[in-house]
Structure formats: C-alpha cells, structure tokens
C-alpha cells in the first residue's frame, strides 16, 4: 500500500518534469485515482479474526484493497488485537454472530444474545459498533431480522459466492470475483489459503474492469465509494 500510494505522485512528478504539469499535488493524484473507479464492489471476509487474519490483511493492503470483515464475536473477544489490526488496515468490521449457529433454529433470546454479545465484543476490541450483520450460512427469517433491527443492523448477504469455504481453487475464486458488477458483494472467508493466494489476482481483475473495493452502505446494502 505504501508503494502504491506513491505511484500517482511519482507519475505526476514525471509529467511535471516533462512540462505537462506544473504543480502536482496529493489532491490531483487522489482525484485521478477516483476517476479510475467506474464502480465499487464489496469484498467480504467471514469467520475471523484468527490465525489467517494477519497474512490476509497484509495481502489486502499490499494490493490496495479494502474489505468488510464479518467477525465472529467469540474470536473478536479472544483476539482483540486482530480486530484493531483490521481497523488499522482500513477494513470495515461487521457482526457475524458470536458462535456461528444456525440462527433460524434458535429462540429469539438466543439470537439476541448471539448478536448483542458480538456487538459488545467488537466494540470492546476497538472495532467500533457494527452497522452490518451477516447471518451464518446466509440463513435468515423474520425473527432474525427483527433482532437485527433492534440493534440497528443491516443484513448483508451476497451476490456472488466464491465457494472458497467449499475448497474452491484459487483460479475459481479469482473467476468469481471477476463476475462482480457495480454495487455487488462477494462472499469470501478469512481462513482459506486459496483465498489469500487469490488476493493479488482479484486486485488485478477488478482494476481491469475499473472496479474499486468499496464499503458496504448500511442504507442500501450495496457497495459504494468509501466515505
Ligand atoms: Zn460464517
């Protein structure tokens, strides 16, 4: 990320040296980058934080990507430094329940506990109070949605499933990211090695389509420019 952040300035300096530009600024470099984004997609990584988180964050930042991390509360409580590392790396943090149960088979009280304890664990770790919730397995119903509403959470499922949880190859994960269109969200996970290996090629694939990694809007559930 540090290297990439300097590229536009170096390019501007080169143009200035050639007489094309006289006053290269960080602002002009930033607007040039923004102009390169014809749309935004939401990269989401579920089930962390855990043993794969640090390497994942390294790869994301090296490739200039930001993402939404749907954390399990039990792991946010166990590894608060990793939650802070997520935020420090420019990631957004969402709620993915405390113990990853099939919520549609639980009582409303249990669903409430799963969600509220995770809100607290993430906040205690320094991850802020999440505004986004992803139910485990994408399983939801009216009771789950009623509890989400109590905590001001927007439910986020996905448009594209990378199948990384199902042993998808790195090629298949990259291809899945290549199917994303403006505003869409892809399901990925914090733990598969193939997902980490796919990150550089996901960055290249998105850039070739003019798509940038954005935040997920709590208002619309769609990927938008970070703001
Ligand atoms: Zn999950």
Image: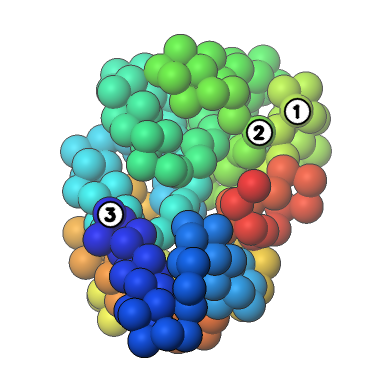
Q: Earlier in the sequence, mark 3 or mark 2?
A: 3
User: Tag 2's secondary structure?
Assistant: loop
Q: Which residue is mark 1?
A: 152
Q: Relative to 169, say whether 197 is above or below.
A: above
Residue 131 is labelled as 2
Q: Which residue is mark 3?
A: 2
Query: On the picture, is 159 further left or further right than 4?
Result: right
Q: Quadrant of the N terminus?
A: bottom left
Q: How far, Cα to Cα, is label 3 from label 1?
A: 35 Å
Q: Residues within 10 Å of mark 3 (few under 14, many from 20)?
A: few
Query: On the picture, is 113 further left or further right than 154?
Result: left
Residue 19 at x, y percent in the picture:
42, 85
Residue 108 at x, y percent in the picture:
70, 21
**164 vs 110, nearest the viewer:** 164
Q: How far, Cα to Cα, is label 3 from label 2?
A: 29 Å
Q: Earlier in the sequence, mark 3 or mark 1?
A: 3
Residue 127 at x, y percent in the picture:
47, 25
């Amino acid at each position: 990320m540090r290297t990439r952040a300097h590229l536009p300035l170096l390019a501007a300096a080169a143009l200035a040296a050639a007489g094309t530009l006289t006053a290269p600024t960080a602002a002009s470099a930033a607007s040039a980058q923004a102009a390169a984004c014809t749309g935004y997609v939401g990269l989401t990584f579920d089930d962390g934080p855990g043993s794969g988180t640090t390497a994942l964050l390294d790869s994301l930042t090296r490739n200039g990507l930001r993402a939404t991390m749907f954390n399990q509360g039990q792991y946010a409580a166990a590894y608060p430094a990793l939650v802070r590392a997520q935020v420090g790396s420019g990631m957004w943090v969402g709620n993915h329940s405390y113990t990853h149960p099939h919520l549609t088979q639980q009582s409303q009280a249990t669903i409430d506990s799963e969600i509220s304890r995770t809100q607290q664990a993430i906040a205690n770790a320094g991850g802020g109070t999440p505004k986004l919730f992803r139910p485990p397995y994408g399983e939801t119903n009216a009771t789950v949605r009623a509890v989400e509403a109590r905590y001001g959470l927007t439910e986020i499922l996905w448009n594209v499933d990378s199948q990384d949880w199902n042993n998808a190859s790195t090629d298949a994960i990259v291809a899945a990211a290549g199917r994303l269109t403006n505003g869409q969200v892809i399901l990925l996970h914090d733990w598969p090695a193939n997902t980490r290996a796919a990150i550089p090629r996901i960055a290249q694939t998105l850039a070739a389509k003019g798509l940038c990694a954005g935040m997920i809007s709590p208002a619309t559930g769609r990927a938008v420019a970070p703001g």
